[in-house]
Image (cartoon, grey):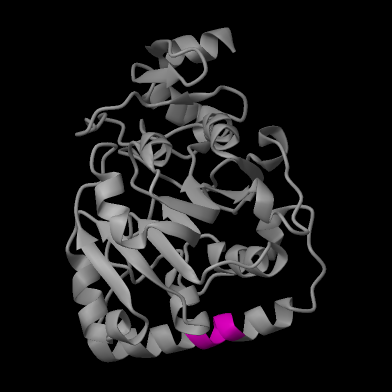
Amino acid sequence: MRAQARHISPELDRIRDDIRFHAGCVQARIDLAREPKHDLAEMGFQAFSQHGEDGVLQYLIRATVPGPKCFVEIGVEDYWESNTRFLAMKDAWHGLILDRDPGAGQMLAETNLGIWRSIDFVQATVTRENVNELLEPMRGEIGILSIDIDSVDYHVWEAIQVVQPRIVVIEYRPFLGPDLPITMPYLPEAPRHPSAIAYGASLNALVQLAHRKGYLLVGTSDGPNAFFVREDALGSVRPTTPAKAWKTLHVREGAKPYRTDQERRHAAADAAFQNVVTGEVKRLREWFAEA
């Protein structure tokens, strides 16, 4: 889930971006002296991310075993607001970004960021079937994988084989709670529910998948992003549990829009969700009736 950046004029956009970038650099320098916090979100700050992911990633890169300074980000809209842009601009990371919208390509051309920091953009709807082919240019170990496509995020991560990220950032759906391991069933062209919120996976579903792939949950941001680190790259970072890391989402979202988790579950009650452990598919109201 990503809010579209507001553009006023090219000149004001440039001034706003300069302020955000330099403020992020100052905060990153201050954070070098900070003690790690029990809640990963407390290490967060926002330069170009939406919910403090810039600061969380700065901390995780320092605290985990060093690796390649390259990334893949799937789901970037126009890339003005993203999880990897600050890394590219501040720390000279390079990588590949993908989205079905062409806006990111325009942004890279306007800012010269694509050339300056060697960022490639591929316009595509990412699915289980095509994700490995799309990521082939980045084959091997990478520093960060970020997934935020507001649909089959769980299934896309499950299918990825050609890259081995040290850190994974992926969106979870807080209104699904911390305990149930459920995700929307897979369809290459995922249908949109009238509520506009019945998509994605619960935090526990992503934890189950992470364990199978060799990753551990290390925390969440103040928004709906979960962070996982590959077991051999943990460094000084300590894993946590879904119960400790889960947070409700304190923003309005959806068609109405909905303010609370209870409102969101009611709106999506007839949507189908699949248990990633048992494979069973039920309506959301049924899962919560049994919880």
Residue 276 screen position, x and y as percent: 48, 21
Q: Quadrant of residue 115?
A: bottom left
Residue lying farthest to the right in this orientation: 35
Residue 149 screen position, x and y as percent: 33, 47
Residue located at (40% from left, 11% from top): 282
Residue lying farthest to the front in this orientation: 140
Q: Is residue 22 magenta?
A: yes
Instruction: Decide whether the magenta segment is chiefly helix, strand or loop.
Output: helix
Q: Is residue 9 visible?
A: no
* In this view, 117 is above or below 243: below
Residue located at (63% from left, 67% from top): 61
* In this view, 200 is above or below 119: above
For the C terminus, the image quarter is: top right
Residue 59 screen position, x and y as percent: 67, 67
**Relative to 246, 117 lies left or right:** left
Q: How many labels, in total?
A: 0
Stretch in magenta: 21-25
Between 107 and 63, the one lying in front of the other is 63
**Relative to 173, 139 lies left or right:** left
Q: Is residue 85 visible?
A: yes
* In this view, 145 is above or below 28: above
Residue 41 screen position, x and y as percent: 66, 56
Residue located at (29% from left, 79% from top): 114
Between 165 and 242, the one lying in front of the other is 165
**Relative to 164, 73 lies left or right:** left
**Relative to 275, 216 lies left or right:** right
Between 70 and 43, the one lying in front of the other is 70
Q: Quadrant of residue 28?
A: bottom right
Between 280 and 5, the one lying in front of the other is 280
Q: Is residue 105 magenta?
A: no
